[in-house]
Amino acid sequence: MMTPQQLRVLVGIREHGSLTAAAAALGYGVPTITHHLAALEGALGAQLVFRERRGARLTPVGESLADEAEQILVRLAQAERLVAAQRDAGLVTLRVGTFASIGSRLIPPAIRELRQQMNVQVEVIEAEPTEVVRLLRSGDVHAGLIYDFADDPAFLTSQDLSLTVLLDEPWGVLTGLHHVSGLEIGEPLDFNELCDADWICSRNQGEASDRVLRRACHTAGFEPRVLMRTDDLSMIHGLAAAGLGYALTTAAAVDSRFDVALHPAFQHLGIRRTSYVTHAGRNAPAVRALLDILMDLATVPTAG
């Protein structure tokens, strides 16, 4: 019978390219690695690793098993975290992933309200939507806040996720307060006149803001010129306030401490949709309670 230790050894050999390196990474001795590998090959009756002069590599059978092993180990780790959270003398640990702009305004009051309702410890992980979804699927968070492009959603078709819409807002263009010549605050921008503009984009080109920007620029007949890729809100606002670049965002995400303005566009940019995402199916009471709180908070107007 295969054991988790044997599977970790196999995955470790593939990741690190030798028994010695795998032993160091896993905190085992080389004899232990050799023992687990031999036991696994004996149980399966198949060679899983080619040992070479400069290291080791997996056989085709070993590669197939390693692919399955990685998924098994993720589920085992998820199960261990679940049991650990439930055994802590009734204290529930809830891990939530969130992007910064709306999350920084919704999550803190939501945590405060949740703690008034139940004995709960909350851990918050800041990440952009694509990473939040990855953390949810790997079992590293129980729930998260994400945003998406409502006109072309990336996550709604995922059957393993459950999404509840909290907020819909139109996309706009963030600029310096006095850095758009001849344009009043709140007056629409024409993308046909922005071919020479510099843009502040997300680090992940698959995030909704980048997809919206590329679509708008392509419609106007040019490729966006990227000044910087960052998810740091202060950096985004600072660059925009200095007149160095534009960014796509929404009214609720604008930080009024900076000298910036949000302009609509003549072209249709679409809607940024903020959602609460969990695993599909039954979730823990704290996960459901947080959703109810966030839905109430999301109906309260947010200061720009």
Image: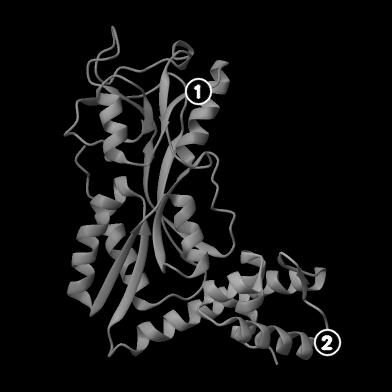
Does residue 75 appear to the left or right of 252 in the view shown?
Answer: right
Q: Nearer the viewer, residue 212 or 199?
A: 199
Q: What element carries label 1?
A: loop
Gap in angstroms between the C-alphas marked 1 and 2? 56 Å
Mark 1 vs mark 2: which is more N-terminal?
A: 2
Q: How many marks?
A: 2
- The residue identified by callout 2 is 45
- The residue identified by callout 1 is 224
Where's residue 209, x and y in %? 45, 36
Q: Which amino acid does label 2 sit on?
A: Gly
Where's residue 176, x and y in %? 26, 21
Q: Which of 215 and 203 is in front in this view?
A: 203
How many other residues sit within 10 Å of disc 2, few (<14), some (14-19) or many (≥20)?
A: few
Q: Quadrant of residue 115?
A: bottom left
Instruction: Tell me if residue 26 comes above or below residue 304 in the rendering.
Output: below
Which labelled disc corresponds to residue 87?
none
Q: Which of 72 and 219 is in front in this view?
A: 72
Of the 4 image quadrants, the one containing the N terminus is bottom right
Q: Which residue is drawn at 43% across and 81% down?
A: 82
Instruction: Tell me if residue 168 comes above or below residue 14 in the rendering.
Output: above
Q: Which residue is drawn at 32% across and 41% down?
A: 232
Q: Residue at x 83, y 87 (%)?
A: 45
Residue with the most extreme front position: 53
Q: Residue at x 42, y 40 (%)?
A: 272
Where's residue 240, x and y in %? 30, 25
Q: Quadrant of residue 220?
A: top right
- Could you tell me if residue 68 is visible in this image? yes
Residue with the most extreme top position: 182
- Could you tell me if residue 70 is visible in this image? no
Q: What element carries label 2?
A: loop
